[in-house]
Amino acid sequence: MRLWLSTCLDDFSSEFDDIEEMFKRGLTRLILQKRVPGAAQDLAGGALRYATEAQYERWLMALPMEFRDRIWVRGTPDMAERLEVRGCVCDAALLAQDVPERWKRVNCVAVCRNLEQLNSLPEWVAGALVGPVFQPQSIYEPVETLGIACIVDKLAAQDMAGDQPEINIPPQVIAFGGIDHENLDDIKKLPLQGISVLGGIWNYADPVNAFIKLGRACGGL
């Protein structure tokens, strides 16, 4: 099970030092997502206003160019290509509609907040972030969660259906939302390819150490 790390929504003083150290310690999948200063705290609900391409470019300039191959940006496939990062993370609704052919050559991960969105993804989408599974630690208000049982039922239906077209699941299914050391054992029981963590790393006083421990516990970086 691979560990995906999301950046903090807001910048902080030691962020680049911590992230560079994590890259050196084996981090292979970083989701760059920053909110517009003063934007509403509604990450799970999808109403968050994310940073602009120019703001992301300035952020990326603080890290060595070699790390861009391990970064997915919260934006469009076109933005990912211009920023020369590995891929993009965007809402499932954007990728489920008719898209330019050039988007299909970009490594795209869709954010799915319900199982209908997961099932409607086209075959060319590389992966899906599914959740929130638990209450996210990065927001202040309670949000509706999918829960483990719901995801288990969906993935079990995929196994029973085999190659039937009505059951469409991307090659990578990545759980997000409230995942940390305390509930990791429950998540590891699911047939997932990865987990995405934000508060489960950045809420600790020593995020690098938290990253190392969680990476070892989930069995892959």
Image (spheres, helix red, strand yellow):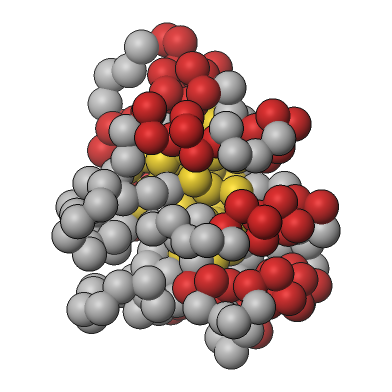
Task: Tell me where residue 43 appears, x and y as whole percent.
Answer: 29, 60
Which residue corresponds to the image point at 82% horizontal and 58% vertical from the top-left? 25
Left or right of 193, for residue 174 = left
Locate residue 216, reporting x and y percent. 80, 72
Q: Is any atom of residue 53 visible in this view?
A: yes
192 to 188, vertically: above or below: above
- Is any atom of residue 133 visible in this view? no
Which quadrant holds residue 61?
top right
- On the rendered structure, is 212 left or right of 96? right
Of the pair 88 and 50, the residue shown nearer to us: 50
The residue shown at (59%, 62%) is 14
Q: Is residue 32 above or below residue 196?
A: above
Q: Residue at x 55, y 35 (%)?
A: 60
Quadrant the N terminus occupies:
bottom right
Residue 127 location (% of width, % of height): 53, 43
Residue 204, horizontal then vertical, whole percent: 57, 81
The outermost residue toward the top is 101
The image quadrant where one finds the C terminus is bottom right
Numbered label tally: 0
Q: Kindly give the residue lying farthest to the bottom in the view shown.
A: 182
Q: Residue at x 26, y 38 (%)?
A: 93
- Going by the image, does 138 lie left or right of 73? left
